[in-house]
Image (cartoon, grey):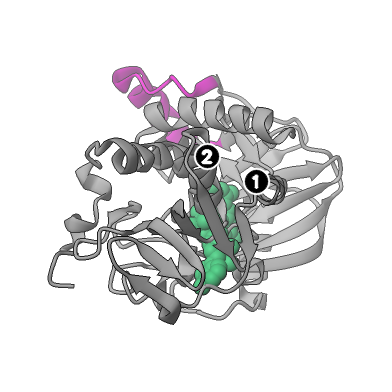
Amino acid sequence: MVDFLIVGQGIAGSVLALQLLKHGKRILVINNEETNIASSVAAGIYNPITGRAMVKTWLAEALFPYLTRFYQEATQTLGEQFLHPMPIFRPFLTAQERAEWLKKTMQENRTDFVEKVVETTFHQENRVCQYGGIVLNQSGYLDVKSFLKATRAYLEAHYAYVEADFVYDYIRLGNHISYQNIEARQLIFCEGPQAKHNPFFSTLPFRVVKGELILVALHQPLEVIYNRRIFVLPQTANQAVVGATYDWQDVSLRPTEKARKILEEKLRDTFSLSYTVLDQRAGMRPATFDRRPFIGLHPRYPQVGIFNGLGSKGVSLAPYFAKIFVEHLLLQKKIPLEVQLSRVGFCKSV
Ligand SMILES: Cc1cc2nc3c(=O)[nH]c(=O)nc-3n(C[C@H](O)[C@H](O)[C@H](O)COP(=O)(O)OP(=O)(O)OC[C@H]3O[C@@H](n4cnc5c(N)ncnc54)[C@H](O)[C@@H]3O)c2cc1C
């Protein structure tokens, strides 16, 4: 008998699995790598200041220090470095925006994630960043692919990983869970966008969003992540990932010409970088209607739970909210209302 059977080993399932193992729990992860359509595409950026208004992201003070601690601990456990702290440069788009941002920042004391404010041209060769911008700290990227691969190897070494498609029909619910020849105290779904097929949770209001990225060869090296309207994440001295688009209508996983054109246009207009497109990828974000995760146990079947809805911020949300969920599962601590399933009226009638 295992304590937790986890379905899915994207960012959510990996982070949850590592935290449960750290607490000495017996777990088994069932995952079909081939159906991963979120973490396998993610650029892995974590960024404390986002949006048009360049404001701190939700819960930034709690999420960002904790994510650094979590992924550093994962490095010790898994023996590889995955987290790559890197400044993010966010240019001002006009002189007026710069003046307003500086004024507001002084008033609202928004500077804790700002390494420095550049009030003049950031890069001499870069005409579009002529209004300067802000350079962020506590930012960077997670090498998601390596993190998932190393987590899988670790789980395999602990006999805690099965590569297979999870079939809902085989679940038997009693005081605990039976699934084929597996017995578990609780079953936790971390299926990302595939949760729409889940008979326990498919009525949760997900708002899955397609996203596309292009890989480009750059004709000049970048030392920081650029982020405004799109991001440009240096991968090697002369390659970068550029993304991402948001499309709520297209449910196909096909890369589109439309998305490539949008990304290229923004790349030229915002950053004036010269480049050659090498590749293009598409995926789906497991987003929710209110941009908050779905975390908790099923109201009618408390042996079954969900850890999902990480949207476009899996890297920064997963560590903190896995900790919250683990404390709920092991110590019955309350889950914050903002991420509870009951906030969307998901109640005992389901
Ligand atoms: C283009 C793009 C760019 C992005 N960039 C970033 C970024 O820079 N930073 C960031 O933080 N986030 C980014 N994201 C968002 C990020 O990808 C998600 O937040 C995150 O990957 C969600 O992880 P997850 O584990 O919930 O889902 P997933 O990664 O989808 O993992 C779910 C896992 O469950 C498995 N699974 C599902 N159903 C079954 C089943 N029946 N049987 C067996 N296995 C099953 C799947 O195969 C998969 O491995 C981006 C997303 C996209 C699309």
Under circle 1, the secondary element is: loop
Mark 2 or mark 1, earlier in chain:
2
Instruction: Give residue 129's quadrant in the image.
Output: top right
The location of residue 172, given as percent across then percent down, is 36, 73
Which residue is drawn at the image coordinates 76% and 58% (left, top)? 215
Residue underneath mark 2: 21
- The magenta region covers 91-115
Q: Amino acid at mark 1?
A: His
Which of these two is toward me, 343 or 177?
Answer: 177
Q: Is residue 87 above or below residue 302?
A: above
Q: Residue at x 39, y 26 (%)?
A: 61
Q: Residue at x 56, y 63 (%)?
A: 30
Q: Residue at x 44, y 43 (%)?
A: 317
- 319 horizontally vs 149: left or right: left
Residue linked to disc 1: 158
Q: For marks 2 and 1, give the CA distance.
A: 10 Å
Q: The residue under label 2 is which amino acid type?
A: Leu
Q: Would residue 117 be seen by someone viewing this image from the given angle? A: yes
Q: Are marks 2 and 1 in contact (CB under 8 Å)?
A: yes
Q: Is residue 145 above or below residue 180?
A: above
> Vertical placement of 38 versus 21: above or below?
below
Q: Which mark is residue 348?
A: none
